[in-house]
Amino acid sequence: MVFCGVEKLSCIDYPGKISCVLFVPGCNFFCPYCHNPQVVRNKLPVSMLEHEALEFISERKDFYDAVVISGGEPTLYNGLPSLCSAIKKNTGCLVKIDTNGSRPDILKLLLENNLVDYIGMDIKTDLRSDSYKQFSPDPNIVSLIKNSISLVIEMAPDYDFRTTCVSPIINSDIIKNICKDIKGARLYCLQYYNTKSDSILNKDFFNGKDPSIPNREMERLVEDGKTILSSCCLRKPYE
Ligand code: SF4
């Protein structure tokens, strides 16, 4: 595997742990609000090779609690299981994967072989309509996401589901439907849209309007979610 970015010190990407975050290039989704267009389109130069990343983390293994593999979409890489295995063997660090949930086959492999300790999975929108078309060209995407949800709830040692709340994609009915579809989930976080970012994958989608949802409305969305799923909560920016 290769990486197009490395965050050498993070206290927020693995809850409660000091982590190193590795960013993989490329993604199979095209979320209109994505603020990493260069990463998604694979336009950034490779900044670290796999053996260099392993060496870097191994040399600092007493400092790090965890390694987070983010992106882009890490599960697009068939080498992901062997990287996770090498991180665990060579550094003893915990491993977290951030994923859009489109590759349940890879998630299953990781979970069956105890290669991940935490999965952070995005749920972009309603699974009960054709809304996922806004994010993925795959006609089977809803069933893939549902499979991933079941695997994460049943098998992941620790996890969270999260939805980035952007207008007009997200509303109260959509949050309630998502809460129904992740029934029993230990943690579901509604995230603010990162308004600080200058770059965005598809500006035209928003017709020049600000896609962020105001604080009061975000709090209302959480309250609506909580009527279905008690673990629904608000994740403040950079929390
Ligand atoms: S937000 Fe995540 S899943 Fe969506 S296009 Fe960007 S990197 Fe891919």
Image: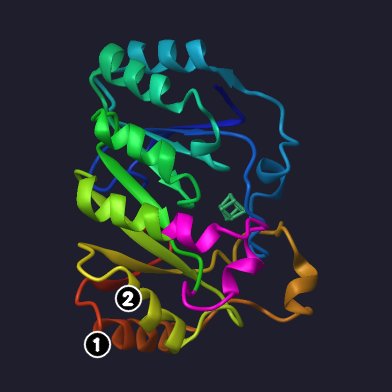
Q: Residue at x 45, y 47 (%)?
A: 99
Q: Which residue is mark 2?
A: 179
Left or right of 3 on screen, residue 176: left
**Which label number is shown at residue 35?**
none
Say which amino acid is labelled 1: Thr
Of 73 and 133, nearer the camera is 133
Say which amino acid is labelled 2: Cys
Mark positioned earlier in the residue sequence (2 or 1) = 2
The stretch of residues the image draws in magenta is 126-145
Total numbered circles:
2
Q: Residue at x 71, y 37 (%)?
A: 42
Percent x, y of residue 173: 44, 88
Q: Which residue is mark 1?
A: 227
Q: Residue at x 19, y 43 (%)?
A: 157
Of 229 and 5, nearer the camera is 229
Q: Could you say whether the residue bearing mark 2 is in a helix, strand or loop?
A: helix
Q: Residue at x 34, y 57 (%)?
A: 149
Left or right of 149 on screen, residue 6: right
Q: Is residue 27 above or below residue 175?
A: above
Q: Is residue 51 above or below residue 34?
A: above
